[in-house]
Image: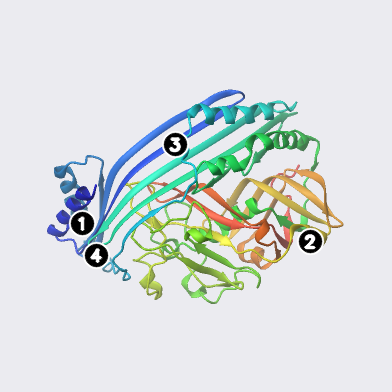
Amino acid sequence: MRDWASWALDTAVARGATYADVRLLDARSRNLSTKNGTVGTVSESESLGLGIRVIADGAWGFAATDQLTREQISETAARAVAIARASARVKKKDVVLAPEQKITAVWKTPIEKDPFDVPLDALVDLLLRADQEMRRVAGVTLAEGSMAFARQEQLFLSTQGSEIRQTRLSSGAGLVATSFAEGEIQKCSYPNSFGGQHACAGYELIEGLQLVENAGRIAEEAVALHQAEQCPQGRRTIILGSSQLALQIHESIGHPIELDRVLGTEANFAGMSFLTLDQLGQLKYGSDIVNVVADARLEHGPGLGTFGYDDEGVPAQCIDIIKDGRFVGYLSSRETAPVIGLPRSGGTMRAESWNRIPLIRMTNVSLLPGTWSLDALLADTDDALYFETNRSWSIDDRRYHFQFGTEIAWEIKAGKKTRMLKNPSYSGITTEFWNSCDAICGRRHWTLWGTPNCGKGQPMQTMGTGHGAAPARFRNVLVGVAYAQ
């Protein structure tokens, strides 16, 4: 593999590139699903290829190939340089990269059990047993389960002399129980919606989810929602469960802090950002207790945004995004960091595959835990709503006005969760919402959730991100308008 990467670098330099890096990626994935007692999907795929990124005449060029012969690799590198020179004809200014050290390293996701060593029969059997438990509940119309595993082995070489070998492995699984009755659909997901929980971990993650043990409970809740009262409308105090808060972080903090969106160099998918450069260090993003970091380091947790080095060879870092409520940091790359005066990239450049150019992507963008226990927070709260598990979301192309719906909510009266509510929703303005946060639960209630399906770029790239959150309370939020009867 090293010879292939070296051939690409040598050709790029010989053709006049002033900088080049090569990513040689060997990827494998396995996906399974079940539906109403039958196997829906069992698929495996493998991919091996090389992508080369160059700077020539002050502009970027990129090309990729899965034909790994010396002749084809050299042609691909030459094509990348030709693309850079063509791009240079319309450049506004030369590309300038923040300095980075030469790195020689090997990094692997730490796992206990390799999911690719688990027999397919055992994986399918687990999903079918959970499926059976959901369908035991009268009124369940559709029972679904899924699992997904991925391994990426990558070699990164650059003309700066870096040589980084990195192996990332992820696992995930989830269940959905759906009930259709009297023209209405209700559903409940476990442990989260949109495919469940995903992390950079081995099969031990799946075992810890206890899918079979939780299947009956979510089925019962899905059926019970038909008899629940409609979520009320008006201004209310709300508490968001940690998985719903994770998506809130993703949409209203994670995307707007991507510096390429801010600078307008990436706006094709989901728009730009309200976080203009003049707001850095000035904007009161949230209340004083709101502290958010972007942390790709393993010590933050095994999130889908955890790695050793990004796809520019920059080490994983912890970056302050919001500190004591103040907006203090962006997600940056080697190219964008100098634009705002940073001495170094934040290490957030990642690509979906060998045939895609790296983009600024969220790592683990997490709300740091507070001090409350959940019992104490509930006891301190009266006449409020507790929202759990995302059902829908909508946010404008600058990430400022939003509306979210969840699968289920609970009324809080006299410090206790009481009646179930159906069709809950809430909406707001990003900065007003985060400034209304007045309580965050502590580390015991904090979970690093995985979002496996974040889209960005054109052609679109799908990337996994992580978001740590504990239940938190927000005051004076508009609720109940999305599904009003």
Residue 3: x and y, percent?
19, 49
Residue 136: x and y, percent?
72, 26
Q: Which amino acid does label 1 sit on?
A: Ala
Write the residue at 60% across / 58% down. Answer: 401
Label 4 vs label 2: CA separation?
54 Å
Tag 4: Cα neighbours inside 10 Å, few (<14), some, or many (≥20)?
few
Q: Which amino acid does label 4 sit on?
A: Gln
Residue denoted by label 3: 116
Could one spot residue 331 in this view of the protein?
A: yes
Secondary structure beneath disc 1?
A: helix
Label 3 vs label 1: CA separation?
44 Å
Disc assigned to residue 160? 4
* In front: label 2 or label 3: 3
Tag 3: Cα neighbours inside 10 Å, few (<14), some, or many (≥20)?
some
Residue denoted by label 2: 376
Secondary structure beneath disc 3?
A: helix
Label 1 vs label 4: CA separation?
24 Å
